[in-house]
Image (cartoon, rainbow, N blue to C red):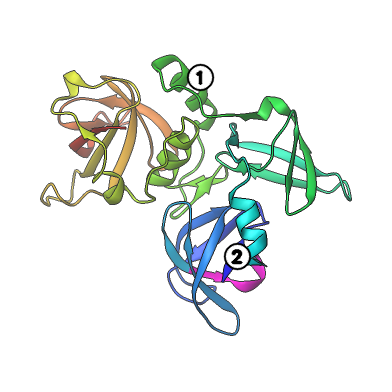
């Protein structure tokens, strides 16, 4: 059974209860496969990145196989490219906040449609995937500065480290897994920071963890060979060297560098 997200952001939880840990979020327009269900909850797989978890039934909309095939075959290359935009229903004039990385089906010059419902949106808030360069990354990433940290979050009111990287990279046409440990397993490995370039992802463990290099728990994106943008407390830019991230507040290392990947 297929389900469609018609809310701006939907929490996905580890267990089938409201108080359970939020592990990720679904964005407007994403589709899910139902794996299991209870009276109130659905266990789903997000078809965008393969993440599984439990979602309150009322937060999803069931769609027929015919509707699903029509929808996934539609052009969904246009994305909301700023942290927040507002779409307006052409049926009832209600507004819908949409967060960065949201894909818009059948988009054309400020209009898009989903399952026969039409919306309008400011064209300045929408783009197709951009080429990843130092300049385009700097321009796009600056709008994400100071978004607060939220475990499992991937929207402008709260993101975790891997959610931030996943959303930002999607704006450049690169679909990554959801979690840092999964992201670190793909891409081309870069041996030294001196060989890196803007847009490479850097993976870390916590400086205090004292664990082996396989325990990846944090990710950021390089803006240059000595600056990294990452979400820890908030999205921010800090100095990085071959040892790791250096806090802009204390001057101490906060995360130990383990892996550099290019996508």
Say whether residue 95 is left or right of residue 251: right
Question: Residue at coordinates 43% horizontally, 52% vertically from top-left?
Answer: 49
Residue 188 position by quadrant: top left
Q: CA distance from mark 1 to mark 2?
A: 35 Å
The number of numbered discs placed on residues in the rendered structure image is 2
SS state under label 1: helix
Q: Which residues are magenta?
A: 54-60
Residue 70, given in percent of the width and then of the height, sits at: 65, 53
Q: Which residue is mark 2?
A: 3
Please tell me which residue lies in front, 18 or 139. Answer: 139
- Residue 139 is labelled as 1
Q: Name the residue rendered at 26%, 37% in the picture.
A: 187
Q: Mark 1 vs mark 2: which is more N-terminal?
A: 2
Residue 37 vertical position relative to residue 20 in the rendered view, above or below: below
In screen coordinates, is 7 left or right of 16? right
* Relative side of 108 to 146, left or right: right
Check the image and name the residue furthest to the right.
92
Q: Closer to the camera, 148 or 101?
A: 101
- Secondary-structure class at tag 2: strand
46 lies above or below 124: below
Residue 138 position, x and y percent, is: 45, 20
- Left or right: residue 37 versus residue 80 is left
The quadrant of the picture occupied by the N terminus is bottom right
């Amino acid at each position: 059974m297929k389900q469609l997200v018609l809310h701006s952001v939907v929490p996905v939880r580890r267990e089938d209860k409201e108080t359970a840990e939020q592990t990720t979020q679904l964005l407007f327009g994403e589709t899910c496969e139902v794996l299991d269900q209870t009276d109130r909850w659905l266990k789903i797989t997000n078809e965008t990145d393969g993440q599984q978890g439990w979602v309150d039934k009322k937060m999803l909309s069931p769609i027929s196989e015919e509707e699903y095939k029509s929808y996934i075959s539609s052009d969904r290359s246009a994305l909301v490219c700023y942290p927040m935009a507002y779409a307006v229903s052409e049926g009832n004039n209600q507004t819908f906040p949409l967060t960065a990385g949201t894909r818009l089906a059948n988009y054309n010059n400020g209009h898009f449609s989903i399952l026969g419902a039409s919306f309008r949106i400011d064209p300045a808030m929408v783009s197709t995937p951009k080429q990843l360069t130092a300049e385009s990354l700097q321009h796009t990433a600056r709008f994400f500065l100071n978004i607060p940290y939220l475990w499992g979050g991937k929207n402008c009111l709260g993101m975790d480290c891997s959610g931030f990287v996943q959303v930002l990279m999607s704006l450049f046409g690169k679909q990554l897994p959801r979690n840092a440990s999964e992201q670190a397993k793909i891409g081309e490995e870069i041996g030294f920071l001196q060989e890196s370039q803007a847009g490479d992802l850097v993976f870390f463990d916590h400086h205090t963890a004292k664990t082996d290099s396989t325990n990846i728990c944090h990710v950021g994106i390089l803006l240059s060979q000595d600056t990294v943008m990452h979400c820890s407390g908030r999205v921010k830019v800090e100095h990085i060297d071959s040892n790791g991230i250096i806090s802009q507040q204390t001057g101490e290392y906060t995360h130990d560098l383990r892996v550099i990947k290019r996508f």
